[in-house]
Image: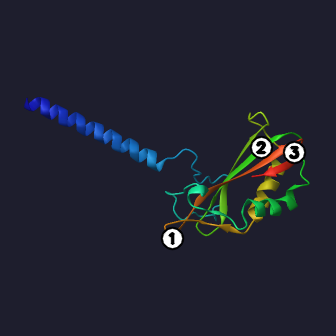
Amino acid sequence: MKNKLNLFLLISFLIALVLTIWLNYQVTNRVGDLSFNKEIDKSTFKVCDEKRIPQYYSTKSNYQGGKKAIKKELWKTTEQLNFGNSGFITFRFIINCNGKIGRFRIKTIDSELKENSFDSLKIKTLQASIIKLQKWNAGTWKDKTLDSYFVLNFKIEQGKITDIF
C-alpha cells in the first residue's frame, strides 16, 4: 500500500512539474513576439520591459488624432507611390513606453491573400514615412506606461494605396 502511495505521489509530482514548465513556456513565449534582431533592428530603440509587450488594443496605445491623423499624415508622402499590382502591406511594430517606435516587421500578400512581394524600395519608403510620425502615445494599464505592439495595414489596388487602416 505504501509503495502505491509513493508511486502515486511521484506521478502527481511529475505531472505538476511538466504542467508548470509548459505554463511558464506559454507565458514567456507568445506567437508573434518581436524579438530584437541585430540584422534589421536599430540598437538605439529600446523597450522598457522585454518580457511584457501587450497588443495595442489592450493598453490603449495610439497615435494622437487616431487612424484619421495617421492617414492624413501618411497620405502626403505615399499617394504618389505606384506598386504595380494589388494586395496588402502590413507593418507590425512596437511603441515603447516613451512613445517611440521600432522593431518593424513587414508582411505582404496579394488580393487573394497569398504571399506576395512588392518593390522593396517602395516598402522602405512606406516604413520611413511611418517612422516620421512623431505623435505616438504609449499604452497604459493601471496608471503604468507600457510598451505595446501596433499594426498598420496598407490596401493597394491597381498599384495605388487606397486605404490605410
Marks 3/2: CA distance?
A: 11 Å
Point out the tag, 3 or 1, that comes first from the N-terminus. Answer: 3
In this picture, residue 135 sits left or right of residue 23 = right
Q: Residue at point 56% right, 61% down?
A: 59
What residue does disc 2 label? 88
Q: Is residue 158 above or below residue 140?
A: above
Whole-percent x, y for residue 161 in the image: 85, 49
What residue does disc 1 label? 143
Q: Residue at point 55% right, 56% down?
A: 54
Q: Nearer the viewer, mark 3 or mark 2?
A: 2
Q: Nearer the viewer, mark 2 or mark 1?
A: 1
- Front-most of 123 and 12? 12
Whole-percent x, y for residue 39 in the image: 66, 52
What's the amino acid at mark 1?
Answer: Asp
In this picture, residue 40 sits left or right of residue 6 = right
What residue does disc 3 label? 83
Is residue 41 among what the camera can see? no
Q: Residue at point 82% right, 62% down?
A: 72
The image quadrant of residue 140 is bottom right
Using the image, tell me which numbered label, if any, was put on residue 32: none
